[in-house]
Amino acid sequence: MILSLRMLSIFLLLLILAPFQSAFSEALGTKWPGTSATFLTGNLPAGGPSGSLPGNTETWRATASEAANRWNNAQNIFTLATSNTVGSGICESSGNNNMSFSTTACDDLFGTNTLAITAAWSRGTTIVKADIIFNINKTWGIYDGSIRFFPEDFRRVATHEFGHAMGLAHTTTSSALMFATASNTYLPTSDDVESLESIYTEVKDDSSGSISFLLLSLIGIGGLRLLGAHKKAG
């Protein structure tokens, strides 16, 4: 991992067990310079999960696009796009906005219950790049409805991580998609949308300064103040 660059904000955004502040009060204070961002799905496998779940007939790439559209259908302040193209610069400050599976969380170990991370680089209050990395060590499926102990729901997790990639942290509202623990919620809620609207209407534009990099520790749950994390209880 390249650590020579200084970064004003990178958030490692995993699914974790401990509650955090609401999305806007967590004060990420960063947003994209425009009202849209494109994520490349070509680094995801071409196929999809195995097993008998109804959603397992879909591909990882198509499902990632569906996850983005779940945000697009819930609000009109920011548009997420996906492209079935192989990207470059995974876990680096330059390159494309990527989605991929990996054995590590940007060269660090995934936490025991960590399902995915989002790493985002910013200059001032402006996000310049983001990557979403899924833990390949987990068993994944695709389904809606009540969360299962096994397998992990790729689309639900991807939708949550897209929230982080747009600038959202975790909320203390347990029924929201951006709650720190994976739950029965698989669509953005009014709490999630209001937090997103707050970021893009209240955070001032500032792209000054240099890009720097911060890697937050993945160990520990209680008391570890990540900008966002998402683990599954277990």
Image: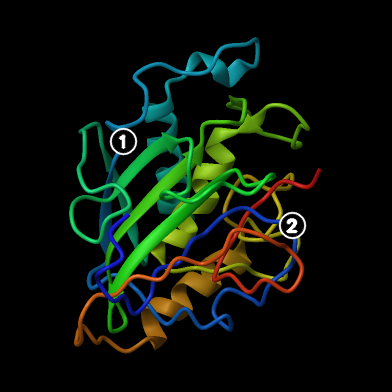
Relative height, residue 146 to residue 54 (above, below):
below
| Residue sitting nearer the eye, 159 or 97 | 97
Q: Type of residue at label 1?
A: Thr
Q: Quadrant of the N terminus?
A: bottom left
| Outermost residue to the right | 234
Q: Residue at x 42, y 48 (%)?
A: 107
Mark 1 vs mark 2: give the one in front. Answer: 2
Residue 150 lies in what quarter of the image? top right
Q: Type of residue at label 2?
A: Leu
Q: Which residue is mark 2?
A: 17
Res. 41 mark: 1
Q: CA distance from mark 1 to mark 2?
A: 27 Å
Q: Residue at x 49, y 68 (%)?
A: 168
Q: Residue at x 78, y 47 (%)?
A: 233
Assess disc 1: are there few (<14), some (14-19) or many (≥20) residues with their C-alpha within 10 Å of its C-alpha. Answer: many
Give the SS element for disc 2.
loop
Horizontal and vertical percent for residue 187?
59, 48
Relative height, residue 143 to residue 132 (above, below):
above
Give the SS element for disc 1.
loop
Relative height, residue 76 to residue 111 (above, below):
below
Residue 130 lies in what quarter of the image? bottom left
210 sits left or right of 221 in the view? left
Residue 36 lies in what quarter of the image? bottom left
| Number of numbered labels in the structure image | 2
Horizontal and vertical percent for residue 87?
21, 40
Q: Residue at x 76, y 62 (%)?
A: 174
